[in-house]
Image (cartoon, grey):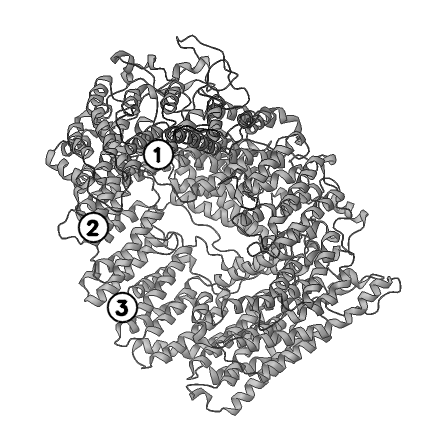
């Protein structure tokens, strides 16, 4: 059957056509090309985008109505669920349905529907309080809808950026997740970044200025805020605007950012996102931004980022520089390449790094150098496609003067070519070089192919360098699709093929794969037939090429001989291949599998392209091989040979029927005649098995030609189906399946189309070489079973299934005793026959089981159609699936209840169960494999630079076949029917059986079915939990088996774990049931418990408790309903009224379920008889249910506090984390106020600043010892600003939001009346001396797992001190005083943690409490510093960094003073340690501490001649870090110590070191000074701001 014609999309070019760059011999005339371009492709019925391959399907005329039905169903029910507030499962289900609709039909809806869908999901995603997992689902749906940007212009859709930013910030900077009260899904940030990448094209014009106002004040080079702000700008800033709108876009910031970037000579953390932004704005505004003035600086930094070593000593000047990522390194140079300055710079860069690409010059830099440069050609191809072949859309056109010319492209290729060819022979980056050469061959074939062919022919003559040959062949194979764009390309085809034949070498598998890749590519491109009867008007060169085509026949014969030789030499030693075959799941090693894949691709193209004569010769040779060679059927030789016969028959069935299938069947019949007792043989010989296998395999693709062989095949099956030999029986079952499959399935049959090779009058046969076609040029003919064939298959099915059904029926009734092997055979026959007819067996959707509590409607059409007229095959007048399921139930009952251990029969039952429940033609695994193989071929052969969908004909046919197969296996979110539910129950029963193999197969079967059926896990949960509860009553061995089986079912497969379901009814049942389960000492049971625990710890996502209706989403849902012919008001009001009531009921029920669940978990964990393993996993479960939207029950808080003293270390650590979460959940909200920060020291308002750094308007937040609040009134009314960024670069436009002064804050104990009971429970224990003594003993114990400063302890302590203030301080200080006097590492570590938490937790305490605390802890700190040891120095540095050095120094200055004193009486180690602590206090580089930096400089200058150069240098580097030379730097106010002054001051003293003839002591002091200065320079160079060039120049002049 022939497919309907397909409208051919015409392509509209941007810029000039690729004249002379990419030319095909069959190129269209200018007139035809212009005609194509003038007729732009317009989708039918104003549809946004349709899948073109649906037009090829034999039932394409029915898809229009089906798509309309699906879309109407989706729009109606999705809107109703939104109005009802039924977000899960209602909206979630219909979102899945919409996603499936797009997969099957494309974006086949109107622009209005398209924008409405996007708006709806935006409103749902941004709705406050939405379930985190649902936010991710809506986000991914938006990404799917917006993926094709060209379909929606910005004037059709507007998106506000601020709500998206708030959501992204909430996810990225989630303090709730950090404290364990909210868990976002994995990859949530990645999904949001993808969404932002689509949305920024639809932000309003005002968005750029709004973003700058929001993020520019966060620019502070010394703070992480600048990297964060620049990251936000790199993500959000819209950079693709109309040229007339540039004033509202990049012109607002580009010059400023460039000057800022160039003002830093170091490698700041914010450079990477800034360069991503520059690269994007360059790529999206090609030709509109003049970059020439910046080219030199750009490429200087580009070279620096490559981290190349310099000199003989291989000195590396830059370390860990991440300023240029790969995409930036490609986008920016490619976007500037039309500039002469850029091209010159690129040529210089390529020349300068050429030596680093030499194969012998290998080092740490190689990977980065290669991965960065080798993708530039790929980026250039993308730009050329954009310029020359992209259809017109809303995106700005590239100016004609900025479009790359052919001369520029050739110039680039000539410059880049030496690097790619050198890299081709490298040890690690050959694949990247191959890709680069391929792209250059696409752009400039005349520049690449001469060198590539020369290297190839030279490597063929050299047998001593196989790796070189392999690399060149890989490059040549990748570039082959563009060979005919090279003027000498066609002339080289036959010489290349002849030269490549020896590459198929049984002794070198990698070389063989490369050679097979070459032949498969060339066979797709070239009609492998002699070019006879050529016209006289052909040139002499073309006539010569046509003459060489006569050698194709000999080449193909030799090629087949070599492939068969490879097959013969495949190893058959299964013992030596065990490890490799496990990786592939077959009896083939990984290399053999790859070779087979290459061979399959080769021979399907060969038989498609060759003429009848050559095909007959090849078929004859295949028959000779198949008839004379005997291959063991489970080994590689039989698989590969049979596959070649199958492919030949699929493509050329007319020739294969007499030459191959008929003769092979005759040989099989002869073998049967020679073995009259074959059915009784327990082990058939290899010859017979091989013939049975190859007939079965070939029969599967014979199509209608098999009809005349049906009587003979039935005779074969009658004698073989019930063979005693298990291998022979399975092969016979495969044959029975193949006979029906080839008749009932729908598949393309015109791979070989003689009309495709018919030449127009006067045309040259060479025009067929490399011929690409448009979709409209392709006709796909299909094998479609008619009524006669369906009737024949139905009769065949009933004839051969009758005996197995009767035997199994009697066996199930107990009236027939048959052994396990016979049962297996009957089941194998049933499986094979049902698999073959499954596409014509309907499901019992009319008996779908409604789910309690689910209010949404199911679709009107459950599955997509897969035939024009779907006729169902029945069995005994009843649905086949129902009959088989009922029989399988009885057989399973008989086996399970019987005394025999018939595990193999049970496994066979499960295989049939899975097929009956889900199968509808080919298996999903086969379709996925087909899709992956086709994707690989498409990547190799697709035309990346030319009109869209201009491909080789074979790709269209395979894509059409794949589209049909995708429809057949579609089962996503299908319904649970009566039959399926019964199957699931029996599968669960077998999944908890005593036999390990049966359990494993059943659990896999269960996961496969549940993954496809909507909410099916709910239907079967009670059965699983009943088995779990009953497992404790079983004998020990059965108990372990049933327990493991239940736990594995609950664990599930990927994302199918019951523990991760977002359904409170399920969670309420599952978590207590797992904790209650009877644990066993069996190690395998422990492993399952560990797996459950790991699943929670790595994949848990918070499930929403309550939902609220989204008014904006309801409006959009109403708009969607408004596009339909419905009684809108009735539906709208009913859905809203009914939905609100149901939502309130759901919310109340969810809260009750949550409280009941956690209370029951606490009760179970408090049971004295609970086993340790159950307790540990239960405690882990409980720790994930402390939430931010509901207070934890009192029982949970009391239990958690008590478990801080648990003897089990893991429980204690988990309890500490739980305690942190509890303190977070009860934390009161602090009052925030907005102030006008732009004023002087006395409060006089000042105009907005135009400079950066310390200025008159920000001096009030800078440290000045005279302004440190020293009275209660001053302290409690001071606005402390702990963040470093406010004021440095400017102020927020709407004022600065800060925490209100302490005097305006409510005390924590009075802030939340609802937390009083919880606070009392905590406080009563932390003021209990015996409890605290025990707790401190644990916290200060020696713990090798936590030898350093413990952030978990710090967090919980900080929360306690913040909430309970000084009420709990005395007992902590009691132990801290003792610890600081000890020199034990664990004691000092605990003291550092407590003191850090005390200082941080007291930030919001009133003045009187703070003064009292300082009086207590300052002596303790000084004692601790005097007792520092080498092991605890890091702990005290962490103390200084996280407490004294954190936040506003006006608050912590008294504490800083306590650590700033370095006594002359201190030992060398004490001095070094105190300097390290001081450095920790200044490590944050707060620019507001200028006066303190001078104080530190004074301290260090007094010790320059000491030997403490490392910490002295570190401190000096901190002091000088603010000495910057950036644009608009404030010069009227001193910014702090200057590096220039310091180095000039000590430069002359260092010079005297070379002339010093004084005492040794003086010389040693000068030497120390010199080393300190040098160390300072080195430290400063590697610091954030990097030493300015003028500083170095001043030292050397």
Front-lying residue, 781 or 18: 18
The first of marks 2 and 3 along the sequence is 3
| Residue 1430: % across, % down | 28, 38
Q: Which numbered dot is residue 929? A: none
**Residue annotated with mark 2:** 1175
Task: Quarter of the image for the N terminus: give it.
Answer: bottom right
Location of residue 569 by image quarter:
bottom right
Residue ID at (56%, 71%): 742
| Residue 999: % across, % down | 32, 65
Give the SS element for disc 3: loop
Mark 2 in CB contact with mark 3 (< 8 angstroms): no
Asked if one can make out residue 390 in the rendered structure from this viewpoint, the answer is no
Relative vertical location of residue 886 with respect to residue 971 in this rendering, above or below: below
Q: Quick one: label 2, few (<14), some, or many (20+) residues within 10 Å?
A: many
Q: Tell which tag, 1 or 3, sits nearer the viewer.
A: 1
Front-lying residue, 893 or 1025: 1025
Mark 2 in CB contact with mark 1 (< 8 angstroms): no
The alpha-carbon separation of the residues under discs 2 and 1 comes to: 28 Å
**Residue annotated with mark 3:** 994
How many marks the image carries: the answer is: 3
| Residue 681: % across, % down | 43, 88
**Residue annotated with mark 1:** 175
Relative vertical location of residue 569 with respect to residue 1297 in this rendering, above or below: below
């Amino acid at each position: 059957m022939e497919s309907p014609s397909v409208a051919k999309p015409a392509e509209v070019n941007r810029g000039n056509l690729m004249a002379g760059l990419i030319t095909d011999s069959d190129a269209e005339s200018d007139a035809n090309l212009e005609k194509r371009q003038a007729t732009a492709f317009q989708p039918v019925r104003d549809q946004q985008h349709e899948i073109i391959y649906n037009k090829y399907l034999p039932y394409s005329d029915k898809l229009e109505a089906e798509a309309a039905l699906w879309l109407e169903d989706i729009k109606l029910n999705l809107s109703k669920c939104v109005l009802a507030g039924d977000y899960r499962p209602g909206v979630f289900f219909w979102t899945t349905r919409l996603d499936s609709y797009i997969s099957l039909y494309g974006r086949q809806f109107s622009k209005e529907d398209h924008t409405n869908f996007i708006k709806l999901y935006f409103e749902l995603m941004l709705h406050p309080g939405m379930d985190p997992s649902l936010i991710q689902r809506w986000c991914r749906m938006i990404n799917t809808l917006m993926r094709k940007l060209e379909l929606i212009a910005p004037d059709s859709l507007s998106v506000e950026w601020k709500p998206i930013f708030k959501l992204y910030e909430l996810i990225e900077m989630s303090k709730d997740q950090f404290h364990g009260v909210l868990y976002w899904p994995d990859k949530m940030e990645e999904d949001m970044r993808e969404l932002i990448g689509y949305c920024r094209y639809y932000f309003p014009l005002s968005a750029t200025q709004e973003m700058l106002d929001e993020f520019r004040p966060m620019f502070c080079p010394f703070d992480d805020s600048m990297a964060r702000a620049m990251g936000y700008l790199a993500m959000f800033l819209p950079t693709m605007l109309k040229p007339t709108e540039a004033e509202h876009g990049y012109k607002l910031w580009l010059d400023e950012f460039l000057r800022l970037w160039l003002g830093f000579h170091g490698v700041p953390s914010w450079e990477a996102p800034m360069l991503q932004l520059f690269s994007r704005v360059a790529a999206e505004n090609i030709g509109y931004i003049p970059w020439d003035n910046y080219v030199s600086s750009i490429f200087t930094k580009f070279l620096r980022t490559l981290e190349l070593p310099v000199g003989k000593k291989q000195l590396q000047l830059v370390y860990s520089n991440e300023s240029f990522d790969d995409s930036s390194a490609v986008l920016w140079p490619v976007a500037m390449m039309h500039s002469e300055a850029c091209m010159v710079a690129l040529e210089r860069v390529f020349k300068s790094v050429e030596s680093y690409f030499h194969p012998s010059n290998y080092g740490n830099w190689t990977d980065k150098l290669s991965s960065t440069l080798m993708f530039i050609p790929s980026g250039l191809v993308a730009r050329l496609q954009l310029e020359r072949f992209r259809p017109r859309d809303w995106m700005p056109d590239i100016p004609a003067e900025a479009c790359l010319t052919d001369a520029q492209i050739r110039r680039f290729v000539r410059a880049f070519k030496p690097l790619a060819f050198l890299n081709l022979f490298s040890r690690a980056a050959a694949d990247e070089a191959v890709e680069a050469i391929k792209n250059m061959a696409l752009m400039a074939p005349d520049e690449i192919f001469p060198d590539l062919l020369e290297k190839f022919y030279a490597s063929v003559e050299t047998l001593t360098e196989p790796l070189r040959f392999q690399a060149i062949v890989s490059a040549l194979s990748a570039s082959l699709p563009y060979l005919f764009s090279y003027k000498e390309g066609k002339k080289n085809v036959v010489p290349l093929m002849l030269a490549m034949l020896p590459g198929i070498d049984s002794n070198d598998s990698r070389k063989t794969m490369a050679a097979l890749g070459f032949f498969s590519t060339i066979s797709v491109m070239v009609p492998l037939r002699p070019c006879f009867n050529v016209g006289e008007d052909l040139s002499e060169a073309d006539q010569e090429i046509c003459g060489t085509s006569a050698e194709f026949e000999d080449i193909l014969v030799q090629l087949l001989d070599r492939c068969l030789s490879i097959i013969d030499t495949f190893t058959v030693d299964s013992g030596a291949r065990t490890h490799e075959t496990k990786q592939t799941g077959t009896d083939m090693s990984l290399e053999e599998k790859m070779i087979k894949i290459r061979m399959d691709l080769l021979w399907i193209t060969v038989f498609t392209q060759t003429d009848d004569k050559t095909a007959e010769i090849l078929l004859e040779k295949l028959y000779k091989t198949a008839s004379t060679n005997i291959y063991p059927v489970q080994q590689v030789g039989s698989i590969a040979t049979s596959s070649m016969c199958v492919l030949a028959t699929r493509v050329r069935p007319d020739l294969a029927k007499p030459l191959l299938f008929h003769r092979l069947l005759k040989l099989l019949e002869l073998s049967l005649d020679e073995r009259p007792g074959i059915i009784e043989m327990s082990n058939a010989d290899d010859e017979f098995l091989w013939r049975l296998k190859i007939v079965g395999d070939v029969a599967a693709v014979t199509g209608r030609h098999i009809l005349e062989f049906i009587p003979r095949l039935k005779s074969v099956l009658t004698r073989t189906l019930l063979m005693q030999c298990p291998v022979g029986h399975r092969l016979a079952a495969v044959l029975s399946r193949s006979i029906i499959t080839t008749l009932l399935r729908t598949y393309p049959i015109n791979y070989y189309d003689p009309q495709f090779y018919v030449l127009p009058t006067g045309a040259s046969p060479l025009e067929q070489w490399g011929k690409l076609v448009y979709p409209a040029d392709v006709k796909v003919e299909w094998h479609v079973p008619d009524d006669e064939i369906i009737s024949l298959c139905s009769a065949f099915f009933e004839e051969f299934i009758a005996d197995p059904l009767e035997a199994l029926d009697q066996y199930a009734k107990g009236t027939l005793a048959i052994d396990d092997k016979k049962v297996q055979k009957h089941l194998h026959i049933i499986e094979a026959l049902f698999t073959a007819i499954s596409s014509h067996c309907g499901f019992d959707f009319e008996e779908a089981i409604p789910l309690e509590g689910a209010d949404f409607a199911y679709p009107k059409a459950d599955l997509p159609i897969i035939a024009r007229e779907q006729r169902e095959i029945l069995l005994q007048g009843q649905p086949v699936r129902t009959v088989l399921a009922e029989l399988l139930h009885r057989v399973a009952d008989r086996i399970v209840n019987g005394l025999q251990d018939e595990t193999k029969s049970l496994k066979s039952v499960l295989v049939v169960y899975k097929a009956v429940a889900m199968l509808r033609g080919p298996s999903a695994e086969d379709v996925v494999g087909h899709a992956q193989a086709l994707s690989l071929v498409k990547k190799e052969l697709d035309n990346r630079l030319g009109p869209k969908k201009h491909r080789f004909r074979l790709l269209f046919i395979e894509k059409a076949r794949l589209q049909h197969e995708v429809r057949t296996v579609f089962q996503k979110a299908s319904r649970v029917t009566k039959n399926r539910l019964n199957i699931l129950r029996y599968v669960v029963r077998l999944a908890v059986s005593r036999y390990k193999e049966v359990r494993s197969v059943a659990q896999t079967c269960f996961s496969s079915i549940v993954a496809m059926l909507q909410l099916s896990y709910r239907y079967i949960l009670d059965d699983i939990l009943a088995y779990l509860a009953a497992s404790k009553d079983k004998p020990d061995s059965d108990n372990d088996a049933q327990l493991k089986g239940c736990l594995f079912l609950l664990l599930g497969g990927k994302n199918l774990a019951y523990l991760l379901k977002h359904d409170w009814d399920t969670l309420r049942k599952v978590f207590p049931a797992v904790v209650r389960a009877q644990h066993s000492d069996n190690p395998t049971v422990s492993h399952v418990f560990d797996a459950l625990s790991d699943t929670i710890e790595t994949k848990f996502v918070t499930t929403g408790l309550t939902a609220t209706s989204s008014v904006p989403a309801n409006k959009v849902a109403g708009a969607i309903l408004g596009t339909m012919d419905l009684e809108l008001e009735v539906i709208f009001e009913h859905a809203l009224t009914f939905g609100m009531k149901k939502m309130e009921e759901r919310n109340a029920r969810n809260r009750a379920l949550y409280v009941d669940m956690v209370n029951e978990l606490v009760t179970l964990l408090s049971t004295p008889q609970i086993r340790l393993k159950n307790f540990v996993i239960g405690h882990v479960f409980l720790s994930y249910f402390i939430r931010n939207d509901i207070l934890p029950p009192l029982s949970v808080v009391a239990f958690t506090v008590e478990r801080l003293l648990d003897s089990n270390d893991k429980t204690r650590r988990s309890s500490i984390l739980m305690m942190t979460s509890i303190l977070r959940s009860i934390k009161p909200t602090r009052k925030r106020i907005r102030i006008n920060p732009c004023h002087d020291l006395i409060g006089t308002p000042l105009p907005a600043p135009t400079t950066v750094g310390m200025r008159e308007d920000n001096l009030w937040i800078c440290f000045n010892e005279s302004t440190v609040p020293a009275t209660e009134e001053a302290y409690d009314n001071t606005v402390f600003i702990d963040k470093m960024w406010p004021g440095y670069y400017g102020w927020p436009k709407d004022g600065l939001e800060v925490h209100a002064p302490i005097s305006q804050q409510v005390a924590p104990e009075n802030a939340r009346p609802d937390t009083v009971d919880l606070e009392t429970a905590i406080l009563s224990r932390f003021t209990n001396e015996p409890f605290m003594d025990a707790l401190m003993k644990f916290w200060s114990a020696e713990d090798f797992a936590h030898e350093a400063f413990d952030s978990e302890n710090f967090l919980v302590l900080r929360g306690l001190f913040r909430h309970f203030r000084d009420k709990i301080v005395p007992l902590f200080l009691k132990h801290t005083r003792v610890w600081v006097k000890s020199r034990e590492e664990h004691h000092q570590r605990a003291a550092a943690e407590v003191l850090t938490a005390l200082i941080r937790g007291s930030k919001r305490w009133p003045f009187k409490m703070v003064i009292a605390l300082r009086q207590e802890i300052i002596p303790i700190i000084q004692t601790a510093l005097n007792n520092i040891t080498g092991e605890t120095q890091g702990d005290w540095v962490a103390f200084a960094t996280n407490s004294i050095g954190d936040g506003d120094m006006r608050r912590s200055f008294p504490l800083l003073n306590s650590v700033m004193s370095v006594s002359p009486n201190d030992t060398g180690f004490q001095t070094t340690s105190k300097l390290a602590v001081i450095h920790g206090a200044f490590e944050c580089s707060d620019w507001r501490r200028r006066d303190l930096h001078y104080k530190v400089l004074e301290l260090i200058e007094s010790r320059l001649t000491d030997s403490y150069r490392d910490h002295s240098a570190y401190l000096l580097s901190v002091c000088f870090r603010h000495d910057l030379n950036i644009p608009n730097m404030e010069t009227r106010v001193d910014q702090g110590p200057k590096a220039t002054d310091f180095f000039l001051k000590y430069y002359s003293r260092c010079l005297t070191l070379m002339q010093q003839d004084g005492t040794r002591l003086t010389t040693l002091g000068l030497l120390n000074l010199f080393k300190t200065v040098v160390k300072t320079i080195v430290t400063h160079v590697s610091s954030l701001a990097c030493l300015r060039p003028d500083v170095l120049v001043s030292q050397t002049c």
